[in-house]
Amino acid sequence: MNVIDSRPYELLIGERWRAGAQGRTFDTLNPATGRVLAQVHEATEADVDAAVLAAHEAYQAHWRKTTPAERGRLLRRLAALFERDREKIAWVETLNVGKPITHSLDSLKAMPSSLEYFAGIIPAVRGETIPVGNHNVLNFTIREPLGVCALIMPWNYPMTLTVNKLGPALAAGNTVILKPSEVTPLSTMVLARLFEEAGFPPGVVNVVNGPGSTVGERLVTHPLVSRVSFTGGTVTGSRIVASTAADVKRVTLELGGKSPLIVFEDAPLEQAVAVAAGDLIKNSGQVCIACTRLLVQESIKREFLDRVQERLDAIRIGSPEDPATEMGPLVSAAQKQRVEKYIRIASEEGARPVQYGSLSGVVETGFFVKPTLLMDSQARMQSAQDEIFGPVQSVISFRDEDEALRIANDSRYGLAAVLFTRDGGRALRMARGIQSGSVAINTGVRTSFDAPFGGYKQSGIGKERGLEAIYENTQLKNVKYDMSV
Ligand code: NAD
């Protein structure tokens, strides 16, 4: 399937597809080969201003006055078009992100349902009446949209993250500017072509491409942007908080993680092995909720690790385009260098890196790294504390429940945690004690569009997805009316 344009991808601003004001383009690569895949027009600050203005005008002129039924109809139409083009979008992600095609297809399967879900919960954008103690006073709330929202994405799951931000933002009555990662912009550009066909008025959704330091920074500091929804690294998130502080903007941050997978001696081992190995290789470990600290009770450590290693030895690393491939490359040369640097650091601080699988079938210029377990890690090692964002897990042993909980919480992150045990009481004690936004018991963490998701500690602020996403995308007004006058 030929899914990549030979002409540079343009920006979507208001009703027009256009080149950046200075006519500059940048390359985006195929990580499996390291070669240029396509060119993309780069927005200037003036282009960002134009996109924000288009979104603002669309919001003021008509979008904020649309009925729930109108917004619902457009979102459902977009869902149908997404389903029609899902395979194409999946191939674009595979070529641009390096995800195995089976994984791209699988991760996009729920996207039409996500859009339909947010179309369906538009009626939740409503207020209530409050009995305030004065019979003559009618006190009620109105839930209102925020206006122009900037939705800023990272490179690891461009499409699922975009759709899960876009649905609730539009459902709540906001207009948006999408800012894909400059590393993986292509799938968003394919999605962007569907807005007009779905019937969205010009300006309701705009797309700008380019570096975070110019395009992203201009977007988040623009006075007409009232909400920033950002998914990316914690350092960038912290910078966005600082940049938006002066204007006191609404900010939702979905940031990094270093999630623990805790395996007790009474664990259903088969499932625990599948989740441990699966998290290591899925999207080459470039998953924010991936469990990258493997906490194993001492008494079963040998058996558990033998089984994980058996699985990893059989891993098929190769071209993301091959349906038999289980693990592809990392997204970029920079990410590959980062992962290799952390494997060296782990070794220097006393852990024992062991690698699995074979790279014999891969293109040499691709950004491949073998899945790696850092055996004999300690909780306080830098390699066990920093987010590496690659196919690397620190293996740490523990003696009992108290120690497991202490190690699990010994992190500046708090995105997710997974635990395996057949002891229901222990599972619930741990679930309550763990400081993270998601906990999965006897299964892996898999986010879904209809359940709230967000981090504790330095993993983020606010919740996206589920009903909470509507609250995040709206503001509440309290109105008081004295009926005796
Ligand atoms: P990143 O922070 O480098 O970039 C993310 C986005 O922010 C990009 O679009 C970038 O252009 C933009 N950006 C950079 N500087 C900016 C600025 N000053 N102002 C505005 N925008 C700016 O992250 P990344 O390397 O693309 O993605 C990897 C990170 O994303 C990892 O830390 C991972 O954990 C995190 N992530 C988190 C979640 C979650 O839901 N919590 C999901 C996926 C990825």
Image (cartoon, helix red, strand yellow):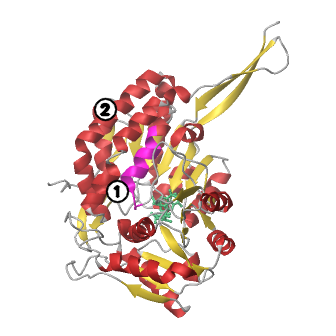
- Give the image quarter of residue 82: top left
The vertical placement of 479 against 235, above or below, is above
Residue lying farthest right?
Answer: 134
Q: Crowdedness of circle 1 by 10 Å Cα count: few (<14), some, many (20+)?
A: many
User: Who's the residue at 44% across and 45% down the image?
Assistant: 164
Please tell me how many numbered marks the rendered image carries. Answer: 2
**Relative height, residue 253 to residue 196 (above, below):** below
Residue 159 lies in magenta, yes or no? yes
Q: Which mark is residue 203?
A: none
- Work out which quarter of the rendered image holds the N terminus and state it: bottom left
**Badge 2 amino acid:** Ala
Expressed as whole percent of the image width and height from the top left, the position of residue 30 reads 26, 67
- In the image, which residues are magenta? 155-167
Circle 2 — which element?
helix
Q: Which mark sits nearer the N-terminus, 2 or 1?
A: 1
397 is higher (above) or lower (below) than 436: below
In the image, is 84 to the left or to the right of 68? left
Q: Position of residue 331 (x, y in %)?
A: 35, 69
> Foreground: 99 or 17?
99
List the single residue furthest toward the top: 484
Residue behind mark 2 = 198
Q: Residue at x 60, y 55 (%)?
A: 437
List x then y, in percent, for residue 243: 62, 56
Badge 1 amino acid = Pro
- Judging by the rendered image, the residue that carries numbered circle 1 is 185
